Image (cartoon, grey):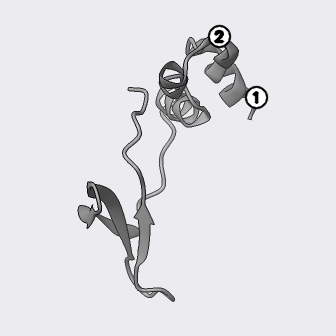
Amino acid sequence: MLVIIEKLGTLGGKPIETLEAQETRLQPTPTDAVTAVIQDFKLPTAPARCDTIENDIPITRGTTPIRIYTPTGEARWKKVRDIRRDYPTAT
């Protein structure tokens, strides 16, 4: 865990108290730090145990993106839906 916290500190984030909302959303996240640590140490990642489908569904003011997870193999639940708003992410 310490290596992730240290990596997050090196990703160049600024104090959120000094930023506007849009700038804050573009700051590095702990997920970015985990991804960087995995790449730095060439750690193996677990294979996906589900298939994913990305789609859009209609809403009042246009569409919203959804992601449908379908577990592979024997599973208790057939499908899990993850509905998200389209927020900008740091790249």
Q: Amino acid at mark 2?
A: Thr
Nearer-N-terminus badge (2/1): 1
Which residue sits at x=35%, y=69%? 68
Q: Secondary structure at mark 2?
A: helix
The front one of 40 and 62 is 62
Give the side of residue 13 with respect to residue 65, left or right.
right
| Label disc, if present, on residue 18 of the rendered structure | 2
Q: Amino acid at mark 1?
A: Leu
Q: Residues within 10 Å of mark 1 (few under 14, many from 20)?
A: few
- Asked which quadrant contains residue 80, the reply is bottom left
Q: Secondary structure at mark 1?
A: helix
On the image, the x and y values in percent for residue 16 come to: 65, 18
| Label disc, if present, on residue 2 of the rendered structure | 1
Which residue sits at x=41%, y=40%? 87
Give the side of residue 49 with respect to residue 28, left or right.
left
Which residue sits at x=71%, y=26%? 5
- Asked which quadrant contains residue 67, the reply is bottom left
Q: CA distance from mark 2 to mark 1?
A: 26 Å
State the residue lying farthest toward the front: 60
Which residue sits at x=74%, y=35%? 1
The front one of 28 and 85 is 85
Position of residue 50 relative to residue 78, above or below, is above
Single out the mark in the foreground, 2 or 1. 2
